Image: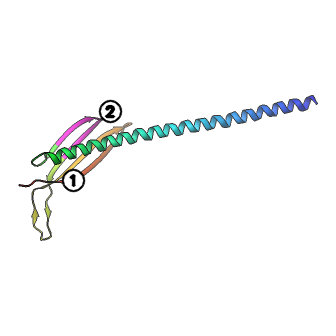
């Protein structure tokens, strides 16, 4: 009888060890998932900040009288590191349906460059600006 009792206790110990192991694996997996979610939120916030920088500069260009600067650069601190904003502008050289030149329209390109964990990132938008003249 004593022998069965010892086997029963040993078997119970194995059950507890297996249960603890499964629990630890589950907790580690959950921790990794939470870490991945936090990283995704940070990356999304950084991307949103860069989009906002580009949108703000586009609004400035559109609201400024006259033609946009042909070349313009600035470093902007976003809270996630510096973003280099590069603007290039040139006449659009568009033609109408009669193949005539359409003047007073410039094509503006805004490029944002920054590093994320040592990896270069770039976002770019292009738009047209019309100045009556």
Which of disc 1 and disc 2 is earlier in sequence? Answer: 2
The quarter of the image holding the C terminus is bottom left
Q: SS of the residue at dot 2?
A: loop
Tell me, for residue 127, which label it has, or none.
1
Q: Is residue 98 left or right of residue 82?
A: left
- Which residue sits furthest bottom? 98
Q: Residues within 10 Å of mark 2 (few under 14, many from 20)?
A: few
Residue at (19, 40) in percent of width and height: 73
Percent x, y of residue 78? 30, 35
Snapshot quadrant of residue 45 = top left
Q: Residues within 10 Å of mark 1 (few under 14, many from 20)?
A: few
Residue at (15, 70) in percent of width and height: 97
Percent x, y of residue 29? 58, 39
Residue at (22, 43) in percent of width and height: 57
Q: SS of the residue at dot 1?
A: strand
Read off the magenta span. 72-87
Q: Is residue 4 left or right of residue 58?
A: right
Using the numbered discs, state the Cα–Cα distance from disc 2 to disc 1 in whole angstroms.
27 Å
């Amino acid at each position: 009888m004593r022998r069965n009792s010892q086997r029963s206790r040993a078997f119970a110990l194995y059950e507890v060890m297996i249960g603890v192991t499964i629990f630890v694996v589950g907790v580690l997996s959950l921790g990794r998932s939470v870490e991945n979610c936090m990283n995704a939120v940070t990356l999304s916030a950084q991307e949103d900040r860069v989009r906002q920088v580009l949108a703000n500069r586009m609004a400035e260009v559109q609201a400024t009288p006259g033609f946009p600067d042909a070349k313009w650069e600035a470093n902007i601190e976003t809270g996630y590191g510096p973003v280099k904003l590069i603007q290039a502008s040139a006449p659009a050289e568009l033609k109408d349906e009669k193949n005539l030149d359409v003047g007073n329209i410039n094509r503006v390109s805004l490029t944002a460059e920054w590093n994320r964990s040592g990896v270069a990132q770039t976002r770019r938008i292009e738009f047209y600006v019309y100045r009556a003249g």
